[in-house]
Image: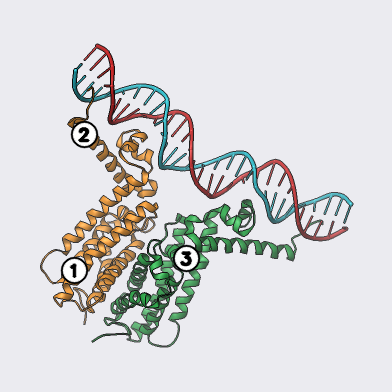
Chain colours: A orange, B green, C red, D cyan
Amino acid sequence: MPYRETEKMRRRKAAARQRILEATRHCVAEGGFGQATISRVAREADVATGTVYRHFESKEALFAEVFRQATQREVDKVTEALAGDEPAPARLERALRRFAHRALRGPTIAWSLIAEPVDPKVERERLQYREAYAFQFRQAIDDGIRETSLPPQNADITATCLVGAIAESLVGPLAPAHRDRYTGLENAQQETLIEPIIRFCMQALTGRGGDNERT
Amino acid sequence: MPYRETEKMRRRKAAARQRILEATRHCVAEGGFGQATISRVAREADVATGTVYRHFESKEALFAEVFRQATQREVDKVTEALAGDEPAPARLERALRRFAHRALRGPTIAWSLIAEPVDPKVERERLQYREAYAFQFRQAIDDGIRETSLPPQNADITATCLVGAIAESLVGPLAPAHRDRYTGLENAQQETLIEPIIRFCMQALTGRGGDNERT
DNA sequence: TAAAGAAGTGAATCACTATTCATTTGTTGT
DNA sequence: ACAACAAATGAATAGTGATTCACTTCTTTA
């Protein structure tokens, strides 16, 4: 019985897998999925290209996993922002703001997650996660309708539209060409962008403006 | 003076170029840009692959041209729907409806124009055209603000959000996996989708529901 | 320390298409 | 009909990067 998988090996493998994921994340954060090649990832993770394939079925599978993890983190933030027992509109506004702020803080990765052209397998993840966002919003909207802090509406569609509105309004600023304009910590610059977006969303939701309602 | 380009030849070349564009359009309408290869296009246009390169710099250039033409047609429809001297909200609602209806009528091509992953050169066209839509909407919104049929707002951002909202809410239904569900001429099915989208958009714009306001 | 087997390696291979270019075919004006 | 040139052809080439696999190295147990 000369060899059997031992705890030590299991840990080592897990560590390698982790390092590969890490390296991929890093490559993507650097230059998007487009710049992340297997050989670059392998180099970064300090393993041979072949090793990557010991841990992941294919490039697409690896990328999909990274996409999934990165997006899940964002979805969690939104979920977090939606929690609480304030009225639904306040919670929704907070979530939308958080989404936008986080995107502008990490524009390269945000762009990869929201809008970068990617392989079909990864694109499928994207669609699923867009649904995940919408699902979170939908629940809050349903809450709001139930508690009458929001008017009756098709929560499903409203949620999808919210996702579209906020994503689209960030695509421009996050695009490689424009990104720098908002990347500087010029907070005021960011607010000028974010406020009207929030206003749009809140008005669509409630029929009123957001926080800073005017007349 | 044994050869000089003659009218006949000029026409013949133009015709070939046209046939190639036509064939590309057809391939794209069939299976999206992803399925459209030069050799397939050439076969369809009944020319040799090399001939394609007599008429277009590169595959991307050809695809960008096709994208441009197809999208321009859609933008024109929106422009058309936005024309007239009714109040801005009515014009905007008509334009949004037309956009959605046309997309559902030709779901494959609509999906290619709105959401299919494409080469960077083509993606650049897409961004530009999204801006073109937003620009059309923006003008109408500005009209509305001026004539007080719309409340004051950042027309630029509102327009972008509208584009995002309507695009996103169509991406799901247009995706290859779902497409068939709305493709059948089940008009009622389509309306169930479109009405809430319009409602969302109009409420964001005006603070009120659209045509079919309730209570 | 040896044998059995797993994990790691990375150069070679494969797959896929866009693109090229030597050759063929077509056109024009004398 | 011919010279001069353009256009069309499509098999061959080229570039890219994912994937494989024969081989090496490491782990485990006896």
Mark 2 or mark 1: name the one nearer the start of the chain.
2
Position of residue A9 relative to residue B126, above or below, is above
Q: Chain of mark 3?
A: B
Q: Is residue B187 left or right of residue B18?
A: left
Can you tell which of label 2 and label 1 is closer to the viewer? 2
Structural crowding at the residue carrying mark 3, measured as other residues with C-alpha within 10 Å and reported as few (<14), some (14–19) or many (≥20): many
Residue ID for mark 3: B109
Residue ID for mark 2: A10
Mark identifier at residue B166: none
Q: Chain of mark 2?
A: A
Mark 2–mark 1 contact, CB under 8 Å?
no
Label 2 and label 1: CA atoms lie apart by 42 Å
The lab-note entry on whether marks 1 and 3 share a chain reads: no
Residue ID for mark 1: A140
Mark 2–mark 3 contact, CB under 8 Å?
no
Structural crowding at the residue carrying mark 1, measured as other residues with C-alpha within 10 Å and reported as few (<14), some (14–19) or many (≥20): many
